[in-house]
Amino acid sequence: MTGAEIFAGIIVVLVIAVIIMGVKQVPQGYEYTIERFGRYTHTLRPGLHVIVPFIDGVGAKLNMMETVLDIPTQEIISSDNAMVGVDAVVFFQVVDAARAAYEVNNLTHAIRNLTMTNIRTVLGSLELDAMLSQRDQINTRLLHVIDEATTPWGIKVTRIEIKEIAPPKDLVDSMARQMKAEREKRAVVLEAEGMRQSAILKAEGEKQSVILEAEGEKEKAYREAEARERRAEAEAKATQVVSSAIAQGDVQAINYFVAQKYIDALQAIASADNQKVIMFPLEASKVIGSLGGLAEIAKETFKGKE
């Protein structure tokens, strides 16, 4: 092999090497920054690209997919002087490769420290009860603050989640006792409320019973008064009939009045409380005769109406 052939072979190899060095393949989900003599010029997106060998070079290879960053546990003092351990997780995505590569050094370290600092600031301004009960509000507030702070770095923070808020064991025990006392208090209140409702219902029932009883007595009195009124009307009618008969000279009418008084006196004697044997002459024929006179009066009255 002559020297010319060797030289030509070397030239071919160098050309091939230069071509290989000038061809860059960017995988999906990544972007490469290109520097010319150390200065950023442009960004290569996923696909096959050609650059100028020895002049242009790849500066940074950035992952453009959403990334999960764990935030380690740190001790935080709440506004009511409770010491708690808090850890979190951050979801972020690079949206501008050039700014993420050249605006901040060690991107993940910067995001982690920025998040830890803001967690201390936000949670330190809250009381322990608010920390434990307002997770969503805390996450939203942290997301707003950290996303705004990382925007100049070409970063979009999509989510921040507080994973755990761990109070000290003695504080947890105290909270458990407090919750137990609250539950017992609610149980006593509910029991007292039940007794109160029972007493109210019982009083309402007694009230309705008294009202119904009074209504019954009222109705009874009304019915009795109505019956007495009707009896009085009947007595008045009978008296009027007998008086008319007497006025016309009918002797049987006088016998009716005598018999009526006689029967009333017998009824009073029979219903007396003293249990005595009373003997007196009883002229039953006269009483019967008086009743017969009453029949004659009624008969004459009906004939007069006809």
Image (cartoon, helix red, strand yellow):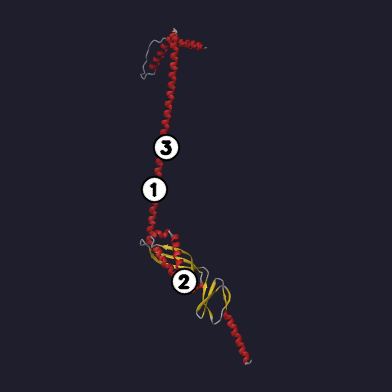
What residue is shown with label 2? 108
Mark closest to the chain's N terminus, 2 or 1 = 2
Q: Position of residue 286 (x, y in %)?
A: 43, 9
Q: How many marks?
A: 3
- In the rendered structure, which amino acid carries the disc numbered 1? Val
Tell me the tag on residue 189.
1
Secondary structure beneath dot 2 equals helix
Secondary structure beneath dot 3 equals helix
x 43%, y 26%: residue:
222
- 204 left or right of 47 in image: left
User: How far, Cα to Cα, is label 1 from label 3?
Assistant: 24 Å
Q: Nearer the viewer, residue 20 or 260?
A: 20
- In the rendered structure, which amino acid carries the disc numbered 2? Thr
User: How far, Cα to Cα, is label 3 from label 2?
Assistant: 74 Å
Residue 138, quarter of the rendered image: bottom left
What residue is shown with label 3? 205
- 191 left or right of 159 in image: left
x 39%, y 48%: residue:
189
- In the rendered structure, which amino acid carries the disc numbered 3? Gly
